[in-house]
Image (cartoon, rainbow, N blue to C red):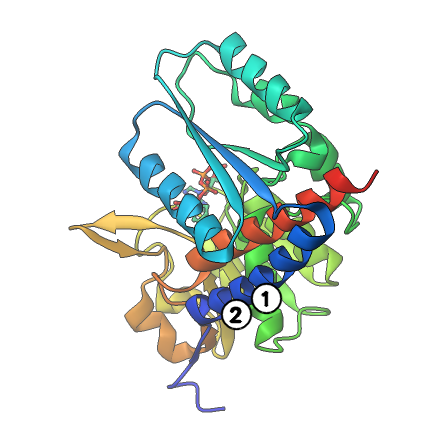
Amino acid sequence: MDNKTPVLLDGKALSAKVRAELSAEAKKNAEKYGRPPCLVVILVGEDPASQIYVRNKEKACEDIGYQSRMIVLPTETSEDELLALIDELNADKGVDGILVQSPLPKQIDAHKVAVRIAPEKDVDAFHPANVGLIALGRNDGFKPCTPAGVIRLLKEYNIPIAGKDCVVVGRSNIVGKPMALLLISEGATVTVCNSKTKDLGKKTSEADILVVAVGKAGLITADMVKEGAVVVDVGMNRSEGKLCGDVAFDEVAPKCSYITPVPGGVGPMTIAMLMENALKSQELNQRD
Ligand code: NAP
């Protein structure tokens, strides 16, 4: 392969394909269960970025043909009020998936919220029961949307994972850590880096597959990437009103065999995987 022209991992196109498949499945479920999957998204407060994310999720539900309910609560909502609402939704047979948009206001403990959502309605896969199933390499729980989207994208382009040296930069509970677990389950040899990692460039330049999830524009430069590597940029940074990733795309891309664009790479896959989890939540909740 000519390394001067990397293949772009087109998350936008794959997301559209996945959504079309889900739309067909939603119709089948509507016949089987009397309604399509129903996702409830809770937003506490008025964070502008969160408002956009929540609207995008609502729109994805509409496009696919799911039912959706958006619940917007005031910033001063107490933890007890939110937990009581979650209890109600857990018990509601008309609700399959529940998602609480982060970040939450400071008076609410995100961990308490994560453990309160019934594991079979936990479409974000933040509940310890789902995290545990991922660690065990099982497919019967939910997988976290962003890491699952990365794996789906790699598979769509027939990029082998087993036996590859993978480096994940970032160790958050939402992206880095579960990303490493999913790659391990696929048979990769995985190194996970963080802000305290010694000589980050030495680690990243050994990667056959490099996944970056940090939140710092331009962190990964050409000298930190091996010739022919596959580079997946999860980062989402806004500079001068433009969205960019953590990878200095223009200088890194010529060294890669495959690379994700930002926007249009991992971002659209995250929503597609959320929609896939919502479909699965209906299967799990209507099973008995
Ligand atoms: P996070 O919770 O802030 O975690 C960032 C991670 O990066 C931490 O583990 C941190 O290390 C590590 N880090 C910080 N500076 C570093 C450095 N100089 N070298 C190596 N590691 C460093 O962020 P997150 O929630 O995982 O999100 C990461 C990025 O992905 C953000 O830009 C976010 O917007 C984006 N994101 C995108 C999507 C999508 O759908 N595309 C979804 C989720 C997140 P320590 O743990 O040592 O502090």
Whether the residue under disc 2 has CB within 8 Å of ligand 1? no
Q: Is residue 255 left or right of residue 179?
A: left
Residue farthest to the bottom? 2
Label ID, residue 21 = 1
**Closest to the observer: 287 or 184?**
287
Q: How many marks?
A: 2
**Closest to the observer: 251 or 243?**
243
**Closest to the observer: 285 or 47?**
285
**Closest to the observer: 105 or 234?**
105
Q: Is residue 162 visible?
A: yes
Give SS at disc 1: helix
Q: Quadrant of residue 13?
A: bottom left
Determine the quadrant in which ligand 1 lies.
top left
Circle 2 is placed at which residue position?
Answer: 17
**Kind of residue indicated by mark 2:** Lys
Q: Quadrant of residue 44?
A: top left
Binning the other alpha carbons within 10 Å of mark 2 as few (below 14), some (14 to 19) or many (20 upward) gives few
Q: Position of residue 184 (x, y in %)?
A: 71, 56
Which residue appears at 36% of the width and 79% of the height? 254
Which residue appears at 43% of the width and 23% of the height? 104
Which residue appears at 36% of the width and 55% of the height? 246
Q: Position of residue 95 (x, y in %)?
A: 61, 33
**Kind of residue indicated by mark 1:** Glu
Which residue appears at 63% of the width and 18% of the height? 87
Give SS at disc 2: helix
Mark 2 to mark 1: distance in Å? Answer: 6 Å
Instruction: Look at the picture and state if 111 lies above or below 158.
Output: above
Q: Is residue 49 left or right of residue 194?
A: left
- Whether pointer 2 and pointer 1 mark residues with C-beta atoms closer than 8 Å, the reply is yes
